Image (cartoon, rainbow, N blue to C red):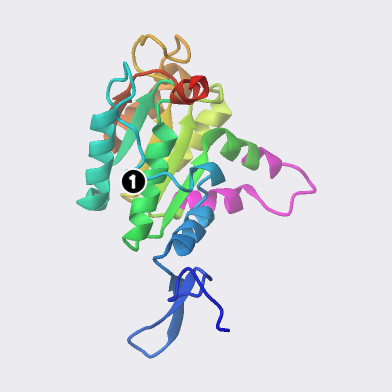
Amino acid sequence: MPEKFNCSKCKDSGWTLFTDKNGFKIAIPCDCEIGVKSVLRRAGIPERYLDCSFENFKVSVPKAVGLKKAKTLLYDYVELELFKKKYGFLIKGTVGCGKTHLCAAVARALVKKGFYKIYFVDFKELLDDIKSTFSFSSDINEADVLSPILNTSLLIIDDLGSERNTEWTEDVFARILNYRYNRGLPVIITTNYFDREVKGALSGETLEERVGIRMRSRLYEMCRDIEIIGPDYRMLMHKK
């Protein structure tokens, strides 16, 4: 009896063979769900966000402000290929309002359009990865950690400001932003911090206080602001 596959094109491997103009066969991700998730994993999207899409993003959350606008702006960013204009977004939002979901939705939509050069990183985890290279027993160095982050076509940084600003953290962030700014490479960044006092914000500190005045200024040049203010959606779901 022939073996059954969910995807007849890739036989559930997530990969198909493509013949280029020179006659060479090249393995490319299949456009099926297995292939899409394979690319998202390699891009660093956390496992719990692999299924996140624009279609399953909820905009009818009670007392939430900015959800629909945020979804529309980011959806158009992908569908109208505005990312090619070399600007990104700074998504400022209260805890649990869907910032990471939206970033994962952007990545998923881009992958389904055949755009694979995406890298997702949690800012605190990035700093921890760099610190781990300082050990004499480490097999990798700081350049190994930063290279994919610096050079990917679209970088997504999640939870900026989660680590308190120091001269070292500001220097790391400056290196990333300045490198990408000078080469016209866009970033999408999420943060729980705002530029003003916001009810329900993580703390009374501003984003400028968390990342430094110099880097906040650079973000104005590289990113368009999106604000989402609302209840913690995870908490709402837990109460149901």
> Which amino acid lies under the numbered mark 1 shown in the image of this protein?
Pro
Question: 58 or 2, which is in the foreground?
Answer: 2
Q: Residue at x 32, y 44 (%)?
A: 55
- Closer to the camera in the image, 65 or 7: 7
**Nearest the camera: 112 or 209?**
112
In the rendered structure, the answer to whether residue 19 lies left or right of residue 222 reads: right
Q: Is residue 103 above or below residue 236?
A: below
Verify whether residue 164 appears in magenta.
no
What x and y, as percent, mark residue 51? Answer: 45, 47
Task: Judge by depth and name the residue closer to the eye, 63 or 210.
Answer: 63
Q: Position of residue 70 (x, y in %)?
A: 28, 32
Q: Which residue is at a point 49% across and 43% down the rendered structure image?
A: 49
Which residue is under mark 1?
186
Visible in this render: residue 3? yes
Which stretch is magenta? 130-150
Identify the residue at image location x=53%, y=57%: 42
Give residue 115's quadrant in the image. bottom left
Vertically, is 181 above or below 153? Answer: above
Q: Position of residue 186 (x, y in %)?
A: 33, 46
**Residue 233 placement, left or right of 114:** right
Question: At which x and y percent is residue 155?
Answer: 42, 46
What count of labels does the image hold?
Answer: 1
